[in-house]
Amino acid sequence: MEKIDTTKEVLASNRPISANKFFSALDECGYTFPISSTRNPAAKLWLDRGMQLAYGFNHEQAIAAFEMALLADPQCLMAHWGLAYCNGVNYNMFILDSNTMMRCEKHVAATVALLQDTAFHATPLERSLCNAIALRSLGNAYPGKDLDASQALIEASNLKYAERMRELYEECKLNAHLAPGTLMADVATLAVEAIMQVRPWKMWPRDAKGAHCTPLADTLYAQEVLEANFAKYSPHPGLAHFYVHLMELAPRNLVRKASAQADLLRHLYPCCGHLTHMPSHIDVQIGNYAAAIECNRKAIKQDEDMETLTAVGRSTFYHGYRLHNHHMLVYSAMLAGQFQPAFSYAEAANNITPVDFFELYIDYLEPQMADVWHVLIRFGHWQELVERAIDFDTSKCLVTYATALYAKALALTALGRLEDAEIMQQRFEEARNNVPHTRVAHLVPSHRSLEVASAMLRGEFLYRKAVISMPASREDWLPEHLQNMYHAFDALCEAASLEKQLPYDEPPGWMQPVRHAIGALALEQAQQLEGLSVMKHDLALLMQRAEDAYRQDLEVNINNIWALLGLNNVLMARQSQDPAMVATLACDIQDVAERLRVARMSADDQTAAMQHSCFCAGQLSSAACCCEP
């Protein structure tokens, strides 16, 4: 097949000639969108590129591709459709400003004008898609600045659009000639996307405690549509992308169903960084943290290359996806026990956003600046946290400031400097209360994440006070001396409950599982009670609390090294405390030990050698392994 030169359109659009290298590389992925009745080969090619980019949520570059289709053929109907589509809402953009809506309206009007021309030829599918996308154009009726009114209109249009796209999909199923070749996969993708847009990130409802409820009929329909099209049309960037997004929120026993489609995205679309990143949404849920780190590394590099070639990248909506790659890599590295990538990518994320763009979208971008503080907490860099300068504008970076104070208070608590910790805790609470409810890390309001921090810090502080208040001699310990200790665990359990109630997000809205601290501190205290007959009941309670914390965490964060280490410690302690349990525990110990061995292979040396599931523990032992590494 003769290669089509698209340099002319790139130059005519005032883009650097190097941009043609980026766009041309899209052709190697094998995806086509063979819908348009245009006879211009370059226009057809630009449509293929535009849809691949749109399926990869790179809407700015998709818009560029559709615009270049119009440069090649000013009468290209589906280029106008693509521009209306990309200027509409999407799975991560729930509302539009007036200018974006007017651009959508402009291109919808262009499709209407072309279709009204009796001399213009369009296929039935093209006409149906253009009529459907017109339902999302609100034109002069769109208030824009009135967010509530705008949201209501968009939600109503989303319902109409979803209903029409569902009807179109069913029509094409009954009449295969309407969507010949691979077009059925595109109709299926667009129909599922429209359905998911009605309830973005809420396709699998949960109750107030975070437990899954009965699946929605629309959810099961979307799953059925996608799975029915895999056999004929996979690999397909849209089918795979939306299947991962649909199934990542499913009950955990269903999430793994998306692994095969995730693996396709991992390798097939090297110019679409977001698609390369998407497997990590499944990886982290099935315990494949190393793979999550690697695909985000690749995605970050791909997007850097895109910016270099196209001179577009850091002042667009897509830049949020680039930051998301860093965020997911940081979280994956934290669970894998890899400090260096977690820390370096957290710091890098704070240096790649232009100041004016950051301030324009501060409510959405600023919360991710806090990642570096979470990394230092995760790996127990207490002294570094105490000394680390707060060298950013605390009047603007409100979430990061509150998180920094939380981290410093936690570090001071772990180091036993309780008077200083209490002062820092008060400063944290003041800062936390200054965080506006508009500040969000993707789907999770930051004020809710900081509620977890508040309860967590309260629990850690109470624990240290309880330890200090115990009689100096263990022989004098009585059950009543542990009451303050139990108050500390009550606060930590409150933090775990608040963490579980956060809206679903990937990575989660709270970066370090609270149960790691609960398990570590409960086990630490239980080991202090060994040999004290009067404390036998409390020993059993604390051991059970630790074991429950680790087992519950491993149901959510599968095979993470921290909980595996903690559970291994619990099982070994139980075996030591009761030799009669050796045979009963043997299989469990062997299983957990093997999983821990594998997890240690991916962890860094410090984490692989640690003795506790959280660096907040260890102060009661001579090893003092929660001190600065």
Image (spheres, rainbow, N blue to C red):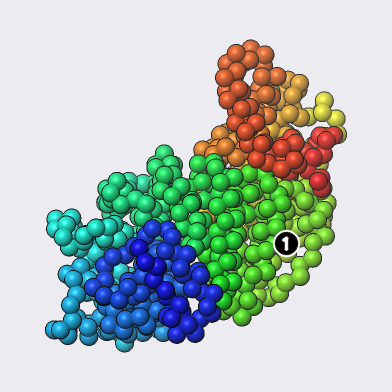
Q: Can you say whether 317 is above or below 177 in the image?
A: below
State whether residue 434 appears in this view: no
Residue name at image x 79 percent, y 65 percent: 389
Quarter of the rendering containing residue 287: top right
Disc 1 crowd, CA 10 A, few/some/many (<14, 14-19, 20+): many
Q: Nearer the viewer, residue 49 or 515?
A: 49
Which corner quadrant holds the N terminus?
A: bottom left
Helix, strand or loop at label 1? It is helix
- Look at mark 1 in the image and give the residue it sits on: 405
Question: x and y percent of residue 158 in the render?
Answer: 30, 69
Q: Can you say whether 12 is above or below 554 in the image?
A: below
Residue name at image x 66 percent, y 62 percent: 370
State whether residue 16 appears in this view: yes
Q: Nearer the viewer, residue 512 or 338?
A: 338
Question: x and y percent of residue 391 in the render?
Answer: 76, 70
Quarter of the rendering containing residue 69: bottom left
Is 11 positioned to the left or the right of 214 in the image? right
Residue name at image x 49 percent, y 51 percent: 266
Q: Can you say whether 548 is above or below 453 in the image?
A: above
Is 605 positioned to the left or the right of 139 in the image? right
Q: Can you say whether 164 is above or below 610 in the image?
A: below
Q: How many marks?
A: 1
Q: Specify the amino acid type for callout 1.
A: Leu
Residue name at image x 41 percent, y 48 percent: 261
Is 217 positioned to the left or the right of 53 in the image? left
Q: Nearer the viewer, residue 596 or 441?
A: 596
Quarter of the rendering containing residue 91: bottom left
